[in-house]
Amino acid sequence: MIRGRFAPTPSGQLHLGNARTALLAWLQARKAGGRFIMRMEDIDKPRSRPHLAAEILDDLRWLGLDWDEGPDVGGPHAPYTQSEREEFYQAALAQLQARGYLYPCYCSRAEIMAIASAPHGLAEEGPAYPGTCRRLDPAALAERAARGKEPSLRFALPDRAVAFQDLLAGEQRFPAGAGGDFVIKRADGIIGYQLAVVVDDALMQITDVLRGWDLLDSTPRQLLLYQALGYPAPRFAHVPLLFGPDNTRLSKRHGAVTLAGIRAAGTAPEVVVGHLAHISGLLDRPEPVRPADLVAVFDLDRIPREPVVLSEALLASLSGEH
Ligand code: GLU
């Protein structure tokens, strides 16, 4: 049984890129006669807004998507909201700790940023963590701990490359140490995205993860966590991102790119879905359709392997300018 999912973070409104990912993930599950699971990723509570979570679900329904399990419909793996799943993350954390995968890190962000020679980590993180605290001897560790500052907990990367086959991005190989030892639990006590997403996908028995290209470089970390926790890993498909007409990553500057903005402009959901299907290689022309009309034509092989540049005309049509 195929189980796909969409896992939005309620820290911003749903935009075209997220809507497209949700549509493709939904199509992948529906085409396979599988189940589609919705999960709200509000693990980073300070950055999450409850009203956005409700708005995101409403936008997805407006688009014509549905889900078999989720925060508002329940299901056998409830709860489907990360802030209510702390016990599962703590259990996994304890397991990792018992198996010796983690070490405390006392470095501040400023200290890490100051290490000029650090190779690049994940795009949104800045430099890769150079492993300073991993190499502390017991005395130095005790001295750091005695200062009273809560450490974060990092996963010690093994000394080997991680390779996997991405259904869209193809063969991937990340060299040993790529991205640096990553945070499992932050100094403020918040569980990191990498652990939460793996625990959730594993416990919710997700077989297929289709998500944005920006998470491709998180995948080796997640594969290491699946192994460390003894879970089978799902298949991955990372969809190339959407760009504005000026070749920069889609943002507010490009006009009505949030579903809220598009809805406010009076655009019909079928028009949005038609454009998303067209840029995803599923329709020859951007004619209005419902998601259900696309199940028959959906095929991962049709999705372009390059980022899609949206035209001015497309953005204008979504903004209600005809
Ligand atoms: N919550 C993540 C995001 O909105 C997605 C996580 C995932 O798909 O693995 O970027």
Image: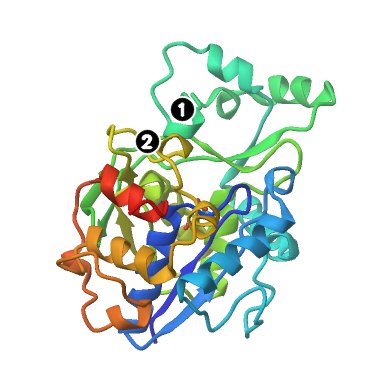
Instruction: Judge whether 126 appears above or below 70 on screen.
Output: above
Secondary structure of the residue carrying tag 1 is loop
Q: Which quadrant would the C terminus be assigned to in this image?
A: bottom left
Give the percent coordinates (x, y) of residue 208.
38, 71
Amino acid type of disc 2? Ala
Amino acid type of disc 1? Ala
Give the percent coordinates (x, y) of residue 252.
48, 38
Rendering quarter of residue 4: bottom left
Q: Which is nearer the eye, 139 or 32?
A: 32
Is residue 233 visible in the rendered image? The answer is no
Going by the image, does 237 lie left or right of 26?
left
Bin the neighbour count of mark 2 within 10 Å (Cα to Cα): few under 14, some 14-19, many 20 and up: many
Bin the neighbour count of mark 1 within 10 Å (Cα to Cα): few under 14, some 14-19, many 20 and up: many
Give the percent coordinates (x, y) of residue 203.
57, 73
Q: Which is nearer the eye, 169 or 172?
A: 169
Estimate the spatial distance between the alpha carbons at disc 1 and disc 2, rounded to whole Å: 8 Å
Q: Which quadrant would the N terminus be assigned to in this image?
A: bottom left
Give the percent coordinates (x, y) of residue 177.
39, 35
Residue beneath label 1, please? 128
Is residue 29 visible in the rendered image? The answer is yes
Q: Which is nearer the eye, 216 or 277?
A: 277
Task: Name which residue lies at 69% across and 26% down.
Answer: 106
Going by the image, does 53 lie left or right of 66?
right
Q: Upstream in the sequence, badge 1 or badge 2? A: 1
Task: Name which residue lies at 50% across and 36% down.
Answer: 181
Going by the image, does 237 lie left or right of 34?
left
Rendering quarter of residue 176: top left
Task: Name which residue lies at 49% across and 51% down.
Answer: 258
- Tag of residue 178: 2
Q: Is mark 1 within 8 Å of ligand 1?
A: no
Rendering quarter of residue 134: top right
